[in-house]
């Protein structure tokens, strides 16, 4: 039964994608603009870039891996900084009220707006890491704080009556209890961080990376390759998101909500 | 006004960020030539030539000061598209005016091999000239495309070993960060056409009179630069905010002239076809293409 | 007899904003080792506050709380506290929940086998690998009791542990609790709303006044275990305590 | 009592901002880099840009208003398209399964990646609108769908037994019941849309807008003004967010959750 | 007498995936206008499904459901349905909730004053501007009843309306319902789990078998209103129906 639904879902998906590509092709034909390639041209460009590479010789897989590597580093740093800070801020309301006036305006500054500062203060890989970090940091931080604040005080009291010290309470009660929120913060943060890759790579510096690929071919006015890059970014983002979702479902079997 | 309502007589002019090649534009504004000819102008600034040309094609600009190669590749790409605004060259802006600067220890072109060299973006005239040069010499480098303002900065931090860029970027690096000029664009390609003044073919059809006036303004401005080098330099310093030392050095690399040079544009186009930057024009179409691209009636 | 818990004119008030709420006015009390003491009192009178002071979660505003002669300190004394609310760790299985207390108290023995023993004792053998959300409310309480007992506590403190349960489960757990207590002979402080429960379980019953709480009366229940709920002396103890409470509630 | 807490909160906020600026000033002094201005220089730049304007003569308020106007239009379009589509998709599961395979990869394409296409296909105000629209669209859409799906079926059946037709049910049951989710989608969407303003304005063209201000001065390497622009974006984003939060609280008095 | 609702060998099954669940096997039934009919049956037997077919929310798989001779259509018939679940619109006040039915049925009269009248009738005067989350469960049910009655329905269908309420509120509402019914003389179909409730309210009691439901028995309760719950005939009706149900439940 579930099987049938799955197959049906896949068939429907294929059908709608087919229709989508068909309409796109029709529009491309009717406009006949050199700047709006149809799906067939994009497919050709995809094949070309995947195998023989771009104008500098880098292939699509190598662009993708480069971007994934950068995002992984920036995201890793975001996790390593935001989770401990979030736990700390969640535990101490005084730290929270002290840092809110600083953090709140900063979190509404888009990552791209940090580009000029990052160009001046950082270079090389660190700049990518910084720009992705700044995108991923706040979702993780805010979710961690929320998760920590939602820790049931009874559980903390329970541990205290067994003589647990505060580091035990943090690691064995507060952290596991906040973990579902932290994970969903990580998921959102990874999504945002991934979306910062184009911003991070548009500054330039290196010829590799999906964002760079897009900008390179936008400058060459070869929109088919630009679309290849966009689709690659969209699909990788999707896959990363579902990856974490799957981990969440595995990890939090004990949560009734996740099961439902 | 918040949305920039477009009045009929206002001409929209695109130019590039901090580009001394466009000194004629700043001189014309400074000297009030546009007002003199009854032209109201609106300036629009872009990070590099390809980006400017994308906006140009979609009809966002009437005139533009831009490098010849981006204009050529945009025209080549959009030639078959009736809706696009195709660029038509009505005057030259300058010849030469770019340079490759490098750090100590890179003193010959061969020593570029394997180094990390910045460019102001894929498809810019500097990028293309560098590619041509490297191909001829059979040298490979890692190209680092970035915005023009970033080039001297990254050089000073040591992220790149050198770069090619339009003035005053090479002169900034020379004066501020101890770079030296490895090759000027004169060495790469003597007397090559650099920036051109283009007008949209649709605009040209509808407003020949305005185009005529604009060309006149442009010619006057270039003459002013030739006749008054000191005050032109002052204008350049005011516009860019750079020191006299930088501007003097930069201006010494630029040749301001209003007469376009079709031959060097043909050479560019041949090379761009070879590089794979232009895919819609073949070598035997180059002459016809460039002839249609340039309209010298107004100069 | 040795005194397990001693309260010397204990008072407690809370600051909330500008206001000060006096919750406990003056309680003096002493509980001998091995006793089963029930505490009853009107809703909101301060019973939970009292219990939290006994295990060191709260400090008294005035007076002294002493456990075996010293202020209570969970790092030195071993408490077995059963909270009214569900206090199981939802991300741990039944077995791991029971092991939690053992691990925290740094019990070096074989925590696994001790935990399994106490799970068997509360009748949950076979449910070791279940998560809290997969078992019923009554079973959760049993797990909490097993966890508290497993650390071999000197003092067991229970805060209305059976309040949420249906009557039948409640009575079963009451009987089991008495069984455990008589076997291990621990000191138990048992807070409840329910007079029937108090008379069924307690050797001494401390009746508190309404807030700010003080001791209204201490009733010594001289009945043999197991007690028959319908026997006349049981009923007369009940009536007596109910009367005390009634006076407090109408006085509200 | 609440008063005291408020005053305390404000004092703490001022204190922490003071400390923050002080540390920043110390770092700026010790590094003494022309590219890292201290808060005092930024304040001066703020005064200069607010009153006499930037190099093109536009003042900070006019930059801000221009950006707000663009975001308002893009956000307005996002609301006008995403809410009806979301209601429709929420009601029809078949539409949902048909459109998911198209929408899911697209929503992970960052707004900046649309810049090349938008330059070529659109111009002027429409390009700003499009880029902000694409940022704000998905949060609104996904929240609307979630809200509609969460409509209690009993309420729908109740309306049906009174003879309500499907348009009445949609407008009087489904829509109001999904409104809290729609509003929070609007809030998130406005935040994202606002953060797209730098991306939208970085292409260049018009000299006005906060994003343009940042990029203009980044090119001039005058970082003090860049920071003025960043702070303006951060604070306006914050204010917009709290504005919608306040509206939400007013509107949804009937929701017990919002009150708590 | 005119027939209000007629079911002619009605059957209903649901498809869920590959499986087909037969919920109602074959029910034939006719309810005269103005009657108060109670339907009882084991849990999950199909009572709600039956009610949903009567007001046109579901179509029968076989057989016919007729309301005044035609298939039920809420756009033509006027139903007053009270669902077991809370069906108030949480974003509307009590007054606006009661007005909702009036507005939807395109009642052109003064909806405001009609609504107020029915709010008064169910004893909620003064609560017009409260939101559902501010009133108790019993009050919510009264609002639902006022909303259903306000549209002057031809037929009132109630699905275990008092199941969630405590015994006292329940009995009060039962009495009020009988009062309203005797005053307006509507046809009422009242579904319940509770045999006591059925005997207290119904003129006819339809007992359903377990799933797939068919009619096990129809009992005509020949007692005057108001009925005394402790009177011997009341108890004997209760026993009789309980026996029918017991047979069904043990047969499960
Ligand atoms: N941390 C606190 N801050 C302020 N007031 C408190 C605090 N803890 C408890 N109180 C107040 O102290 C009073 C007694 O609370 P406590 O929980 O001890 O009562 P209780 O007798 O356990 O009540 P119940 O029978 O409902 O469990 C209550 O009125 C409560 O509002
Ligand atoms: N839409 C549906 N799809 C599949 N099965 C359904 C559907 N609606 C009801 N059922 C099944 O039909 C059976 C009868 O449901 P119904 O709600 O009518 O029972 P009920 O007698 O009202 O039960 P209760 O006394 O619990 O209210 C149940 O087993 C239920 O699972
Ligand atoms: Mg309590
Ligand atoms: Mg039912």
Image (cartoon, coloured by chain):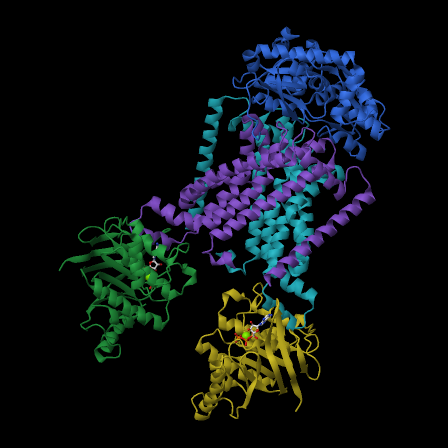
Chain colours: A cyan, B blue, C yellow, D purple, E green
Q: Is residue A20 above or below residue B298?
A: below
Task: Say which residue appears at 65% left-offset and 61% top-offset.
Answer: A91
Q: Which residue is located at x 52 percent, y 79 percent? A: C192
Residue E184 appears in view: yes
Coordinates of residue E128 in the picture (x, y in percent) = 37, 59
Q: Position of residue E5 (x, y in %)?
A: 20, 57
Residue C126 in the image: state x and y as whole percent: 52, 71
The image quarter containing residue C11 is: bottom right
Residue at the top extreme of this rendering: B297
- For ligand 3, the image quadrant comes to bottom right
Q: Position of residue A225 (x, y in %)?
A: 59, 28
- Residue C99 visible in rendering: no
Residue furthest to the front in view is D51
Quarter where residue A231 is shown:
top right
On screen, residue D109 above or below B11: below
Horizontal relation, residue B7 to residue B296: left or right: left
> Which residue is the extreme one toward the left?
E1
Decide: is D95 above or below B232. Answer: below
Image quarter hosting the N terminus of chain C? bottom right
The structure residue drawn at horizontal position 44% and vertical position 40%, both measured from the top left corner, is D85
Count of numbered labels shown in the rendering: 0
Q: Nearer the viewer, residue D187 or E19?
A: D187
Towards the viewer: C110 or B218? B218
The quadrant in which residue C54 appears is: bottom right
- Front-lying residue, D156 or B4: B4
Query: Viewer-proximal residue, B268 or B43?
Result: B43
Up-down: is B206 above or below D62? above
């Amino acid at each position: 039964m579930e099987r049938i639904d799955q197959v049906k879902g896949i068939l429907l998906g294929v059908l709608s994608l087919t229709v989508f590509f068909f309409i796109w092709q029709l529009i491309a034909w009717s406009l006949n603009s050199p700047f709006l390639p149809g799906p067939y041209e994009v497919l050709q460009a995809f094949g070309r870039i995947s195998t023989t590479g771009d104008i500098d010789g880098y292939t699509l897989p190598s662009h993708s891996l480069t971007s994934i590597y950068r995002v992984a580093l920036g995201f890793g740093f975001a996790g390593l900084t935001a989770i401990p800070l979030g736990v700390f801020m969640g535990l101490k309301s005084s730290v929270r009220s002290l840092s809110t006036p600083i953090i709140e305006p900063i979190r509404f500054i888009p990552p791209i707006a940090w580009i000029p500062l990052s160009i001046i203060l950082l270079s090389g890989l660190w700049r990518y890491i910084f720009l992705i970090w700044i995108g991923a940091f706040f979702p993780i931080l805010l979710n961690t704080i929320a998760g920590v604040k939602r820790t049931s005080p009874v559980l903390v009291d329970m541990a205290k009556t067994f003589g647990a010290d505060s580091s035990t309470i943090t690691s064995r009660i507060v952290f596991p209890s906040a973990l579902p929120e932290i994970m969903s913060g990580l998921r959102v943060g990874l999504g945002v961080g991934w979306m910062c890759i184009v911003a991070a790579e548009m500054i330039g510096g290196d010829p590799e990376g999906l964002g760079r690929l897009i900008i390179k071919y936008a400058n060459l006015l070869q929109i088919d390759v630009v679309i290849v890059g966009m689709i690659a970014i969209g699909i990788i983002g999707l896959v990363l998101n579902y990856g974490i979702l799957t981990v969440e479902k595995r990890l939090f079997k004990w949560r009734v909500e996740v099961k439902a | 006004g918040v949305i920039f309502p477009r009045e009929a007589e206002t001409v929209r002019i695109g130019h590039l960020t901090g580009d001394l090649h466009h000194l004629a534009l700043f001189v014309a504004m400074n000297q009030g030539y546009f007002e003199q000819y009854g032209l109201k102008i609106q300036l629009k600034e872009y990070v590099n030539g390809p980006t400017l040309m994308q906006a140009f094609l979609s009809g966002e600009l009437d005139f533009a000061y831009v490098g010849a190669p981006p204009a050529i590749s945009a025209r080549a790409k959009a030639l078959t598209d009736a809706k696009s605004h195709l660029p038509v060259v009505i005057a030259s802006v300058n010849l030469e005016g770019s340079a490759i600067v490098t750090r100590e220890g890179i003193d010959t072109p061969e020593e570029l091999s394997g180094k990390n060299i910045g460019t102001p973006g894929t498809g810019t005239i500097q990028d293309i000239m560098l590619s041509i040069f490297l191909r001829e010499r059979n040298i490979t480098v890692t190209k680092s495309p970035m915005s023009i303002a970033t080039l001297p900065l990254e050089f000073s931090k040591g992220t790149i070993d050198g770069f090619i860029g339009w003035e005053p970027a090479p002169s900034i690096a020379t004066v501020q960060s101890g770079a030296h000029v490895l090759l000027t664009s004169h060495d790469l390609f003597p007397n090559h056409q650099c920036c051109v003044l283009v007008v949209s073919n649709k605009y040209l059809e509808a407003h020949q009179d305005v185009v005529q006036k604009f060309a006149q303004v442009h010619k006057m401005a270039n003459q002013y630069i030739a006749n008054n080098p000191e005050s032109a330099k002052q204008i350049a310093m005011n516009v860019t905010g750079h020191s006299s030392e930088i501007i003097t050095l930069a201006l010494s690399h630029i040749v301001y002239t209003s007469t376009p040079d079709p031959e060097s544009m043909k050479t560019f186009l041949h090379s761009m076809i070879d590089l794979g930057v232009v895919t819609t024009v073949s070598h035997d179409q180059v002459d016809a293409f460039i002839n249609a691209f340039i309209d010298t009636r107004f100069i | 007899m040795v005194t397990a818990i001693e309260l010397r004119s204990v008072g407690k008030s809370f600051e909330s904003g500008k206001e000060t709420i006096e919750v406990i006015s003056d309680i003096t009390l002493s509980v001998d080792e091995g006793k089963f003491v029930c505490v009853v009192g009107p809703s909101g009178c301060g019973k939970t506050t009292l219990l939290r002071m006994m295990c060191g979660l709260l400090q008294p505003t005035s007076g002294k709380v002493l456990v075996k002669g010293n202020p209570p300190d969970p790092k030195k004394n071993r408490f077995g506290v059963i909270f009214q609310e569900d206090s199981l760790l939802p991300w741990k299985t039944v077995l791991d929940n029971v092991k939690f207390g053992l691990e925290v108290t740094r019990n070096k023995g074989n925590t696994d086998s001790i935990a399994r023993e106490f799970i068997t004792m509360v009748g949950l053998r076979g449910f070791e690998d279940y998560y809290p959300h997969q078992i019923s409310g009554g079973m959760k309480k049993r797990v909490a009791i097993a966890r508290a007992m497993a650390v071999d506590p000197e003092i067991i403190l229970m805060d209305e542990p059976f309040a949420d349960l249906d009557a039948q489960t409640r009575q079963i757990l009451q009987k089991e609790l008495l069984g455990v207590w008589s076997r291990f002979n621990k000191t138990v402080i048992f807070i409840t709303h329910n007079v029937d429960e108090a008379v069924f379980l307690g050797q001494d019953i401390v009746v508190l006044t309404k807030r700010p709480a003080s001791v209204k009366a201490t009733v010594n229940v001289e009945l043999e275990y197991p007690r028959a709920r319908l026997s006349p002396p049981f009923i007369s103890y009940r009536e007596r305590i109910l009367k005390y409470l009634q006076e407090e509630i109408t006085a509200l």
